[in-house]
Image: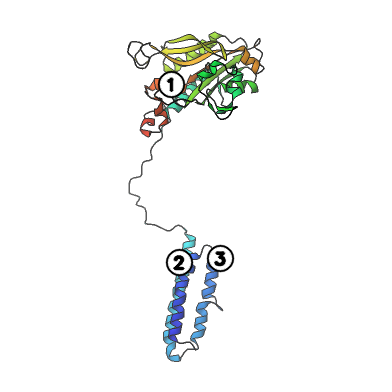
């Protein structure tokens, strides 16, 4: 026959178990199961102890009754706390003080290269150009061959190419997208292609192994060099100012004939400083390459060069942005120093 100390020991043993069991409850049905185990009318542990109490010595009954009632209340309170926890799973921490000032979120600013890319895009969009893109991992065919670079042609040396294997490489310019677009679409074509390009360069103030270009391509009937000149002059004056001096210099690219490089007046010295560090005292700054699409390039994409003509250009966004903002080192663009990036804002 149990006695009071045995009853007390039994309760104590269950008290520590109850704490663990309460902590393990995850769902309402866990809770229900626990409630039944302790408080179930027939076989609940607390109820069984009340049954046992009936067999105690009558002298011990009042104390035992008090003990059991306290234990039962204890169990009920524990289960109620678990239930409340299930209803509000997030522990209520200290209340927030709504009178404290808010935290200021830092405003982002567009990256200077992105600002220029958008500016260039919007000027060409005004003129009815569309925007295209293409893969940064290219084949030898698109990056060179279709652009009229024969295998082993020395012109390939102008581009220090990063090869992935014999056939795949990181594109060295955005020009391969010209080919991809002309393969898919027939003229009239009027597009620009902004994107990243890669070259095997040792980084220095004017060279990076990754940088940005914008390619342009116009193909239609009766397109002439006058269109090339007029469009590029308009573009550069929209970008740098109405009065900007622009000059075209004969040049060579395998995929254009004739080819021209385009210079703009040095905005740093106004063509006045023979010791200018930006233009080297020449008064001019080379800004892009361009030319009339070579007939061989048209043949490579099955466009008839007797019926169609076109012009193209390629411009380095980094170089233009450096020039426009007076940024002395191309690597600043890629250092991700927010103090640098935050200086530039979209107009
Ligand atoms: N792809 C040339 C480069 O990376 C730039 C270029 C020159 C692109 C003449 C053209 C072009 O489309 O017609 O240096």
Q: Is mark 2 within 8 Å of ligand 1?
A: no
Q: Is mark 3 within 8 Å of ligand 1?
A: no
User: Which element is circle 2 on?
Assistant: helix
Instruction: Write down the quadrant of residue 58 in the picture.
Output: bottom left
Label 3, label 2: how far apart the Cα atoms are: 15 Å
Label 3, label 1: how far apart the Cα atoms are: 67 Å
- Badge 3: few (under 14), some or many (20 or more) residues near its Cα, within 10 Å? few
User: Which element is circle 3 on?
Assistant: helix
Residue at the location (63% across, 15% down)?
Answer: 298
Earlier-in-chain disc, 2 versus 1: 2
Q: Is residue 152 left or right of residue 234?
A: right
Residue 256 pos. (x, y %): 56, 13
Relative vertical location of residue 269 with respect to residue 22 in this rendering, above or below: above
Residue nearer the viewer, 34 or 177: 177
Earlier-in-chain disc, 3 versus 1: 3
Residue to which mark 3 is pinned? 29
Residue nearer the viewer, 4 or 176: 176
Label 2, label 1: how far apart the Cα atoms are: 67 Å
Q: Is residue 85 visible?
A: yes
Residue at the location (42% across, 91% down)?
Answer: 59
Residue to which mark 1 is pinned? 319
**Pointer 3 and pointer 1: residues touching (CB < 8 Å)?**
no
- Badge 2: few (under 14), some or many (20 or more) residues near its Cα, within 10 Å? few
Residue to which mark 2 is pinned? 81
Total number of numbered discs in the rendering: 3
């Amino acid at each position: 026959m149990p006695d009071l100390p045995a009853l007390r020991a039994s309760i104590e043993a269950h008290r520590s178990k109850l704490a663990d069991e309460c902590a393990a409850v995850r769902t309402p049905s866990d809770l229900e199961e626990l409630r039944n185990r302790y408080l179930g009318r027939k076989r609940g542990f607390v109820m069984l102890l009340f049954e046992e109490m009936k067999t105690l010595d009558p002298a011990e009954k009042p104390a035992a009754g008090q003990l059991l009632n306290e234990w039962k209340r204890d169990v009920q309170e524990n289960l109620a706390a678990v239930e409340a926890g299930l209803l509000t799973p997030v522990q209520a921490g200290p209340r927030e003080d709504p009178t404290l000032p808010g935290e200021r979120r830092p405003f982002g600013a567009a990256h200077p290269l992105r600002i220029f890319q958008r500016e260039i895009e919007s000027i060409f969009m005004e003129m009815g150009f569309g925007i295209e893109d293409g893969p940064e991992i290219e084949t030898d065919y698109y990056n060179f061959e279709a652009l009229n670079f024969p295998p082993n042609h020395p012109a390939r040396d102008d581009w220090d190419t990063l090869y992935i294997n014999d056939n795949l490489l990181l594109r060295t310019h955005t020009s391969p997208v010209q080919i991809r677009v002309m393969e898919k679409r027939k003229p009239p074509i009027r597009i620009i292609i902004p994107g990243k390009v890669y070259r095997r360069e040792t980084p220095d103030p004017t060279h990076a192994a990754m940088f940005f270009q914008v390619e342009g391509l116009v193909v239609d009937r009766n397109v002439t060099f006058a269109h090339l000149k007029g469009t590029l002059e308009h573009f550069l004056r929209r970008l740098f100012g109405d009065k900007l001096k622009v000059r075209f210099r004969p040049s060579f690219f395998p995929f254009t004939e004739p080819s021209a490089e385009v210079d703009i007046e040095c905005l740093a010295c106004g063509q006045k400083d023979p010791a200018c560090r930006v233009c080297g005292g020449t008064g001019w700054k080379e800004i892009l390459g361009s030319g009339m699409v070579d007939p061989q390039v048209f043949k490579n994409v099955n466009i008839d060069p007797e019926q169609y003509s076109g012009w193209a250009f390629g411009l380095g966004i980094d170089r233009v942005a450096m020039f426009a903002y007076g940024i002395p080192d191309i690597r600043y663009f890629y250092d991700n120093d927010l103090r640098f990036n935050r200086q530039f804002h979209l107009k």
